Image (tube, helix red, strand yellow):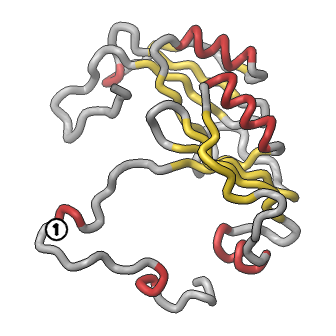
Amino acid sequence: MCASVERFDQVIPRPAMTNDVTKLGKIRGIDHIGITVPNIEEATQFLREAFDAAIVYDTVREGQPRQSPEKLAATVALKGGQRILATRIVRLGKSANIELFEIEGATPGVEGIGALGLQHFAIYCDDITEVLRRVLAAGGTQLCGPNALFGLEKGQGNSMHYTRAPWGTLIELISIPTDTAPGHEENRWRPS
């Protein structure tokens, strides 16, 4: 437990009481995913070229006030000798944000989806071939593909292709123009 915080409700105020329980604790969707990169400017350039990413803002950069190393270590699980050099929020289309971290002393991550933890993110594409061309031109690499989706995701034109960013993060390109798995609890999200 973080020593500087005694109770959760002291940090995040409780919402005003309401009779509408649907508003309490409502999950709206993914706000962002975080990726540690070796160079924040190069990573931003790759995401711009490959996926039309736009910078939302920088949360940490040289010349801005910073939290103490001890507070950061407790807050975001930094290890001894690691220091956040820069943090940036970028956005891809009308979807979730990506938070990029450049960390001094960062260690290499996992090699693929066979390890526990967050292993990849997927970009919805109307034309996987064109987006793959952009990924490769921006310095990414491809794995075997494209591959037709199967099982409940099978459908005309439904496909995916795994790629790697220059720093190694797995990025799946996916397209699902044909509806899949009707009659379940919820429909799969797709950009409108």
Q: Between residues 173 and 148, which one lies in front from this camera angle?
A: 173
Q: Residue at x 76, y 45 (%)?
A: 37
Farthest left residue in view: 19
Q: Amino acid at mark 1?
A: Val
- Left or right of 119? Residue 141 is right
Which quarter of the figure has residue 27? Answer: bottom left
Mark 1: few/some/many CA within 10 Å (<14, 14-19, 20+):
few
Q: Residue at x 31, y 33 (%)?
A: 188
SS class of the residue under badge 1? helix
Q: Between residues 35 and 183, which one lies in front from this camera angle?
A: 35
Which residue bears the numbered disc 1? 21
Q: Residue at x 78, y 57 (%)?
A: 61
Looking at the picture, does residue 121 appear above or below residue 26? above
Q: Residue at x 62, y 88 (%)?
A: 4
Expressed as whole percent of the image width and height from the top left, the position of residue 15 reads: 30, 75
Quarter containing the C terminus: top left
Query: What count of labels does the image hold?
Result: 1
Expressed as whole percent of the image width and height from the top left, the position of residue 168 reads: 75, 35
- Left or right of 139? Residue 122 is left
- Left or right of 18? Residue 11 is right
Expressed as whole percent of the image width and height from the top left, the position of residue 99 reads: 62, 49
Quarter containing the N terminus: bottom right
Q: Between residues 30 and 109, which one lies in front from this camera angle?
A: 30
Expressed as whole percent of the image width and height from the top left, the position of residue 115 reads: 63, 46
- Left or right of 64? Residue 96 is left
Which quarter of the figure has residue 119? Answer: top right
Which quarter of the figure has residue 167? Answer: top right
